[in-house]
Every structure is written in structure tokens, then in C-alpha cells.
């Protein structure tokens, strides 16, 4: 019986060490995640502002400029669309 428990004990020791390393890595990644997300948001906002500046400098007849300045007219119906 002692020989049968020996492989399980060694596996348990190896897996415990592996699991502890995994948890440490996950904690480090969680600590870095807000910094990465903030950088991504800042990057996307800067690209949007650059695109807006580009469109604002366009001639008035260009489609992106017309779409940006378009004001919808009319009235939408309230509520859920009717069944057909």
C-alpha cells in the first residue's frame, strides 16, 4: 500500500507548486489589467479625436463631413414596432 500512495504524494506536491505559481501569476496580471485598459481607452480616444479633426477640415460636400453635420428630421414612433 505504501508504494501506491507514493506517486499520488509526488503528483500532489508537483500540482500544488504549479497551482501556487498559477495563482501568483493571475494576481500579477490582475494588478496590471487596469493600467492596460486605461492605456487602450486613452489610445482609442486619441484616434477618435484625430479622425474628428480630419473630418472637420474636409470640404462641405464630402460624405463624412455631411454625415457628421447631418441633423435628422421627422419623428419616430414610440414603443415596439408593430407585427407584420
Image: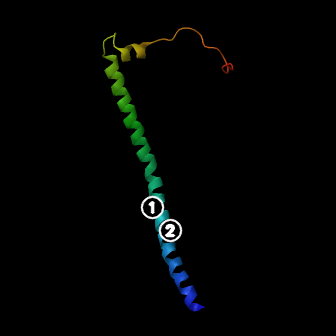
In percent of width and height, residue 34 lies at 45, 47
**Would you call the spot at circle 1 few (<14 residues within 10 Å), some (14-19), or many (20 or more)?**
few
Q: Is residue 80 left or right of residue 4?
A: right
Residue for badge 1:
25
Q: Is residue 12 left or right of residue 83?
A: left
Q: Is residue 52 left or right of residue 13?
A: left
**Residue at left offset 34%, top offset 19%:** 55
Please tell me whether residue 16 is drawn above or below residue 51 in the rendered image.
Answer: below
Which of the 4 quarters of the picture holds residue 67?
A: top left
**Residue at left offset 60%, top offset 91%:** 1
Which of the 4 quarters of the picture holds residue 66?
A: top left
Kindly state the secondary structure of the residue where label 2 is placed: helix
Front residue of 60/28: it is 60
Give the colour scheme of this rendering.
rainbow
Residue at the outermost front position: 84
Lower position in the chain sequence, tag 2 or tag 1: 2
**Residue at left offset 39%, top offset 41%:** 39
**Would you call the spot at circle 2 few (<14 residues within 10 Å), some (14-19), or many (20 or more)?**
few
Residue for badge 2:
19
Amino acid at each position: 500500500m505504501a508504494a501506491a500512495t507514493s506517486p499520488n504524494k509526488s503528483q500532489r506536491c508537483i500540482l500544488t507548486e504549479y497551482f501556487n505559481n498559477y495563482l501568483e501569476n493571475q494576481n500579477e496580471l490582475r494588478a496590471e489589467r487596469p493600467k492596460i485598459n486605461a492605456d487602450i481607452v486613452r489610445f482609442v480616444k486619441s484616434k477618435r479625436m484625430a479622425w474628428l479633426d480630419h473630418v472637420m477640415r474636409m470640404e462641405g460636400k464630402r460624405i463624412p463631413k455631411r454625415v457628421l453635420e447631418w441633423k435628422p428630421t421627422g419623428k419616430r414612433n414610440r414603443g415596439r414596432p408593430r407585427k407584420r
